[in-house]
Image (cartoon, rainbow, N blue to C red):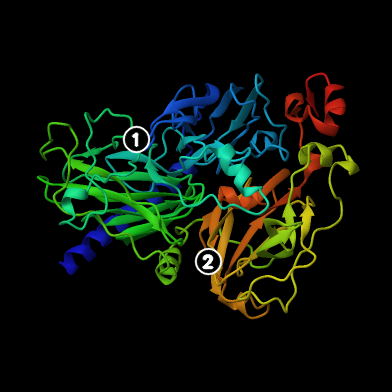
């Protein structure tokens, strides 16, 4: 059996390598130049839904749908999304197109107070941008905790017409993973901003494509009297919280695109009895490797290949469970249905064995082992061998004026009223603190003890880079405010991919830990985790004029100040729409232009 598994892996990997050569040839010959403008009209608002079978009147969706509509385009296409804010609670909004570089259109990045003014109720904002790289992406709200409220959807970019992926598959599925609270996002915001601090707690449910089950389990009858929840009972498969089943044919290869838009939870994804071959991470091809399951952090996306080579008379569980935090949230489940298998009267197919067991939540060595398997596919861009600018960023939890906050090098981010893109472009000095932010932290800082940071404060300074500088960022994790604990933080960079040069335990040692960096085949990603009491080293080239957010992708941590601002080449930015900057101190300036700023 081991020999057969090894041969299967070799065949899949050889197919991927052959496909990659075909992609290179198609790029040299030149693919189709047929590109188009794809128009979407989005209306954002609250609606009454049952994501986990419990009715909630504050589910945020688009055009009456939760999750929002899937956007699909080809490389080179221009997307024009007309976004109307119809939120009944008088909330502004904005949407970030996660993983899209926005080269030449930094105002379309969707970050309120950074790249644009927030979109007020009753207003329409026009996002126009070109998608320049194939991959698995998604979009989500980037104002307040609106991602937690359900403002998200998938964004898939296919290769240009005439080009082929470096791997073969017969069909594909798209899975968007999320977590769900019964308290509204506004209630969560109040709790996180209160004094004394009130933590929002663990989510009540996990969702797969917006569907989950609370207070029942689809697998209860398979647990041999060990079930802690009753069996879920659905009237029909069309019920709002019934799982979306993946129907497959035997002996085929399927691509499953997986993206995590969770607000808090790190997840483990598994399919009973099926191996997975990982081929894409955050829109970048990776050296294919086979695993039984994958860990996926908020903000990450993957493509996996599975072969439906199991008994076609059975069906198989697809499961997600919580990793990295002591779980108080049950698994989410759906089913891989072989079309030859039987269907129950309710059209819900229940496998006859228990679902995969989620690995122990605090087995971080297992998490690191998976992460360290991710390498760039041969032929991918290699990182520069040296950096021009290095930042050492310490992640700490702090008390500031009695409020519990997250801080980076002792500064907890509070965004200004005027978008940085406008205030830097027009040199409005009063819009934010122009002093240089700290680029390192004390060498004597004890990362294993609760923080003692008497100088922690609020701030909104900007890290300014010269165009095309090579920037290293060392993310350093540390102990939380009290007790003995250190969280996982998935960090996401807007406007760029970065090379993940390496991970390490303990405090980063300059002059020593650089020797561990992978400069041969580090993966390109836009989101990477920093593990408890550890460090993560990233490298990117500051080659995209604009102002860009770099932040922890855990919604509550970002709300509590865990982020920094990068800026490069802002004076090169042209054609900013008036609407993007028609607020704060830039409103008067931008309105003096006829249409756009040049």
Q: Nearer the viewer, mark 2 or mark 1?
A: 1
Crowdedness near tag 1: few (<14), some (14–19) or many (≥20) residues, C-alpha within 10 Å: some
Q: CA distance from mark 2 to mark 1?
A: 34 Å
Give the quadrant of the N terminus: bottom left
- 65 lies left or right of 485: left
The secondary element bearing badge 2 is classed as loop
On the question of residue 544 being in view, the answer is: no
Crowdedness near tag 2: few (<14), some (14–19) or many (≥20) residues, C-alpha within 10 Å: many
In the picture of the structure, the residue carrying the numbered disc 2 is 531
Residue furthest to the front: 196
Instruction: Using the image, tell me which numbered label, if any, was put on residue 4.
Output: none
- 178 lies left or right of 319: right
Q: Residue at x 16, y 49 (%)?
A: 221
Instruction: Using the image, tell me which numbered label, if any, was put on residue 53.
Output: 1
On the question of residue 8 being in view, the answer is: yes
The picture places residue 12, in percent across and down from the top left corner, at 28, 55
Q: Quadrant of residue 96?
A: top right
- 3 lies left or right of 228: left
Mark 2 or mark 1: which comes first in sequence?
1
Front residue of 194 and 577: 194
The secondary element bearing badge 1 is classed as loop
The picture places residue 290, in percent across and down from the top left corner, at 32, 60
Q: Quadrant of residue 588?
A: top right
């Amino acid at each position: 059996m081991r020999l057969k598994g090894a041969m299967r892996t070799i065949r899949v990997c050889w197919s991927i390598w052959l496909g990659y050569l075909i992609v290179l040839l198609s790029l040299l010959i030149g693919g189709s130049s047929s590109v188009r403008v794809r128009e979407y009209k989005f209306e954002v608002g609250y609606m009454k839904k049952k994501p986990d079978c419990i009715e909630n009147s504050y589910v945020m969706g688009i055009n009456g749908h939760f999750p929002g509509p899937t956007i699909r385009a080809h490389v080179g296409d221009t997307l024009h999304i007309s976004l109307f804010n119809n939120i009944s609670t008088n909330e502004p909004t904005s949407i970030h197109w996660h993983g899209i570089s926005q080269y030449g259109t930094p105002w379309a990045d969707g970050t309120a107070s950074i790249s644009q003014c927030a979109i007020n109720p009753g207003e329409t904002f026009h996002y126009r941008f070109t998608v320049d790289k194939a991959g698995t992406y998604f979009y989500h709200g980037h104002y307040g905790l609106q991602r937690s409220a359900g403002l998200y959807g998938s964004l898939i970019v296919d290769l240009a017409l005439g080009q082929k992926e470096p791997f073969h598959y017969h069909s594909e599925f798209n899975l968007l993973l999320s977590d769900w609270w019964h308290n509204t996002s506004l209630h969560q915001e109040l709790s996180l901003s209160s004094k004394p601090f009130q933590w929002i707690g663990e989510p009540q449910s996990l969702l797969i494509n917006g569907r989950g089950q609370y207070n029942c389990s689809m697998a209860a009858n398979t647990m041999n009297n060990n079930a802690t929840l009753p069996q879920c009972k659905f009237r029909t498969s069309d019920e709002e919280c019934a799982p979306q089943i993946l129907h497959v044919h035997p002996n085929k290869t399927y691509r499953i695109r997986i993206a995590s838009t969770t607000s808090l939870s790190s997840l483990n994804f598994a399919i009973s009895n099926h191996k997975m071959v990982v081929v894409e991470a955050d829109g970048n091809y990776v050296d294919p490797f086979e695993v039984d399951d994958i860990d996926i952090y908020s903000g990450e996306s993957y493509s996996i290949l599975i072969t439906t080579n199991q008994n076609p008379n059975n069906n198989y569980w697809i499961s997600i469970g919580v990793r990295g935090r002591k779980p108080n949230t049950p698994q989410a489940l759906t089913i891989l249905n072989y079309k030859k298998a039987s269907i129950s009267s309710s059209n819900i197919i229940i496998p006859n064995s228990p679902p995969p067991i989620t690995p122990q939540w605090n087995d971080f060595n297992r998490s690191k082992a998976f992460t360290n398997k991710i390498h760039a596919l041969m032929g991918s861009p290699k990182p520069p061998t040296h950096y021009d600018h290095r930042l050492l960023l310490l992640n700490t939890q702090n008390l500031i004026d009695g409020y519990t906050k997250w801080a980076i090098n002792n500064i907890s981010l509070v965004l200004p009223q005027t978008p940085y893109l406008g205030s830097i472009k027009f040199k409005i000095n009063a819009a934010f603190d122009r002093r240089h932010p700290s680029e390192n932290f004390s060498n004597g800082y004890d990362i294993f003890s609760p923080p003692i940071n008497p100088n922690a404060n609020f701030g909104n300074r900007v890290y300014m880079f010269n165009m095309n500088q090579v920037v290293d960022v060392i993310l350093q994790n540390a102990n939380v405010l009290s007790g003995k604990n250190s969280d996982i933080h998935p960090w996401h960079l807007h406007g760029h991919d970065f090379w993940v040069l390496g991970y390490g335990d303990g405090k980063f040692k300059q002059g020593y830990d650089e020797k561990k960096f992978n400069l041969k085949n580090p993966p390109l990603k836009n989101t990477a985790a920093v593990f408890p009491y550890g460090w993560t080293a990233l490298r990117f080239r500051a080659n995209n004029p604009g102002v860009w957010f770099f932040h922890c992708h855990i919604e509550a941590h970002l709300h509590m100040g865990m982020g920094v601002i990068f800026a490069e080449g802002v004076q090169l930015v042209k054609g900013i729409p008036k609407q993007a900057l028609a607020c704060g101190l830039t409103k008067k300036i931008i309105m003096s232009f006829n249409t756009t700023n040049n």
